[in-house]
Amino acid sequence: MADEQSIVKVYFLNDDQQWEILGKGHVSAVYVERHQGICLLVRSEPNGIQILESKIDPDTPYQRRQGTLIVWSEAENHGMAMSFPDAASCYEIWKDICQVQGKDPSTDITHDPLVDSEDETLDDVTDDVLELPNCELGKLDQIAHLVTSVLTSPLHKEKLALLVGNEDFIKQLLQLFHTCEDLEDIEGLQNLHDIVKGMLFLNQASLLEILVSDKYIMDVVGCLEYDPALAQPKRHREFLTQKVKFKEVIPIIDQALLQKIHQTYRVQYIQDILFPIPSIFEENFLSTLTNFILLNKSDIVNMLQEDDEFLSTVFAQLRDKTTDDDTRRELLFFFKEFCAFSQTLHSANKNALFKTLTQLGILPALKIAMGINDLQIKSAATDIFTYLVEYSPSRIREFIIEDQESEGSILFINLVIE
């Protein structure tokens, strides 16, 4: 029997008669006592968890497809498939199946063919070869059709991501976007919308990093303006480049940090404005986009936290009673967003951040802000205080007790209550 060396992908036929991947792991054909027979076992590659245990029944029809795929049915309407990396490893398992069933391994079918309704759906798995049309103006409709057609097949999504996930293809595609705009080619622009949206739905981190890089993100946003469902294209680029004003209350010297802040805002814009209420289907496809934003926010918090001079300057102005209301308001708005971003941190990192903020004097700064007769300032300070209570309620309690023992000032707790 074949030893546990071959790595396969296991698929099952779902209730909608679509193939879904069950997992990936090492396959072997071994005797299992409780089944009293030879079974196909697949254990996941990283942790050894069992993905599949399927007894090779003498009467079960098995098929070998294209030399690298074995397909069978566990029960009625319960199709299974294993995809091998090469024909040799597939043949080793195929020999084991044929040995149990007393069949010649040179055949590709051990019994009568599978029922037609199931056999037709095998195209999603067996048609492993995807051909990407040349990136040309006249073939945008073909590319759009290909991109949108693979989204229901995990295997095809993975293969297409490899084909389009290189900078040369993306560069050519976005050059065609400028050509279509110059020619006012609406059909081409709508195809580009579907292509770029579909590429985001491929849910591949390496592809996403190229699409949202400084070099290409505005062209990506431009493509997404031409939604075929809209009567007129939206002006997202105009909004991002002309109407959005980035305020630096304290100048940010670190260019890498500045770039990440701008990138995060634009990617968040893509998620919030262009995909505001994704369907369950779309939501699963946008998980990489969501994770990208969360990681960026975490990076921004960490980079700001490591910049002692920046945070020290912020808190020095917040603690200074002579700081004018406009500046204080902007500083608090900034810090409120900083606290919102910090929600992406792990618990240990949150505790470390709170310790840093406490040392810099966040609570005395908030006490000053809450005592100012300005609704926006008080509201922002209260929101920040709420975040801090979530971080460390015990430290907040200590500060309130210490504040009650001080003399000659309004109690912090009274300002919070107001």
Image: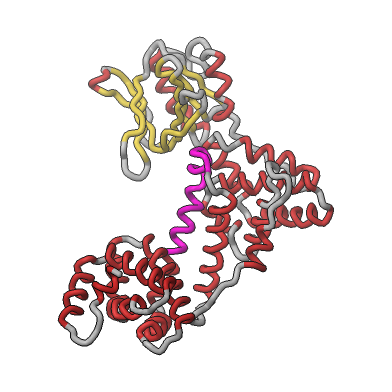
Identify the magenta region: 278-297
Instruction: Choose top left, top right, bottom left or bottom right for residue 301.
Output: bottom left
Residue located 63% across and 35% down the image: 149
Q: Nearer the viewer, residue 104 or 189?
A: 189
Quadrant location of the N terminus in the rendered image: top left
Along the line of sight, the residue nearer the viewer: 123 or 390: 390
* Residue toward you, 101 or 337: 337
- Give x and y (percent) for residue 358: 28, 77
Q: Is residue 160 left or right of residue 6?
A: right
Query: Which percent across, then down, holds residue 192?
Result: 70, 48
When the figure is inspected, residue 104 is found, relative to residue 126, above or below; the finding is: above
Q: In the picture, residue 29 is in which quadrant?
A: top left
In magenta segment, residue 284: yes
Q: How many marks?
A: 0
Q: Can residue 279 be seen in this snapshot?
A: yes
> What residue is shown at x 48% (from left), y 25% (from top)?
70
Left or right, residue 243 beside residue 185: left
The percent position of residue 127, horizontal first and vertical second, equals: 60, 30
> Vertical placement of 176 versus 202: above or below?
below
